[in-house]
Amino acid sequence: MSDSATSASGAWSVEQSLGLYGFEAWGRGYFSVNRKGHVVVRPDRRPGRSIDLYEVVQGLTERGITTPVLLRFRDLLASRLRALHDAFAAAIEENEYRGSYACVYPIKVNQQRHVVEHIQRSGRSLGFGLEVGSKPELLAVLAQSRQHRGALQALPFTTADQERFARLAAHSIAEQETIEAADTLPFEEYRKAYLAVEQLSVDGKPVAYPADKEK
């Protein structure tokens, strides 16, 4: 049955899902809904290369892995880096700017090693770099540098240093646990207040959904 026929019969259609959840507004070609009504990811925005998230979750369930899960798509990150580079390159050429542009990723945004390493690998050919704002972040970035890794690993790491870093880590964990303990709002209440269909909007305008159209 076609989507138009489905819609005419009163059942929900793929086009209605796309409009209701604003995929065109925020998906930017990376996220969409397929003909099965499943959310799909297109890591490089090619329509013919998509990953059905419902099927992914089903596959994980069959392996005994239950939600919530965190899925990462490295090609999507590489695509965004390329898009950022190309946008600035086009603007520089269009405005005949004589300077240069160098993008740096502040690792405080996400300090997980595999994320930083992938940004470094994907951005190397584009001239991208990493930005740090503290000594621990500096050490983390130096550890990713082939030029400085050997020298950094050769530095003495005394017992006093180990104890100091352990105290800092314990303090950070304790603070995070305090923050999480203070968050007592049940998820279902949070969902109704902030994630409900009624709260959706595109360009600042509420998204119309079937209940509104019937009134």
Image: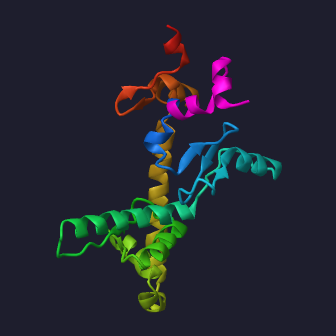
Q: Is residue 21 above or below residue 210?
A: below
| Secondary structure predominantly adopted by residues drawn in magenta | helix
Q: Is residue 174 left or right of residue 11?
A: left
Say which of 210 and 161 sits in front.
210
Q: Is residue 149 visible?
A: yes
Say which of 40 and 58 sits in front.
40
Q: Position of residue 187 (x, y in %)?
A: 56, 31
Bounds of the magenta segment: 1-19
Extreme residue in the top direction: 215
Q: Position of residue 131 (x, y in %)?
A: 33, 70
Residue 3 lies within the magenta run? yes
Q: Is residue 12 visible?
A: no
Q: Quadrant of the N terminus?
A: top right
Q: Position of residue 146 (x, y in %)?
A: 46, 88
Picture mark count: 0
Residue 176 lies within the magenta run? no
Q: Position of residue 19 (x, y in %)?
A: 51, 31
Q: Residue at x 53, y 56 (%)?
A: 45
In this picture the colour scheme is: rainbow
Q: Residue at x 81, y 53 (%)?
A: 63
Q: Residue at x 57, y 44 (%)?
A: 32
Say which of 46 and 54 sits in front.
46
Q: Is residue 59 left or right of residue 168?
A: right
Q: Is residue 187 above or below residue 98?
A: above
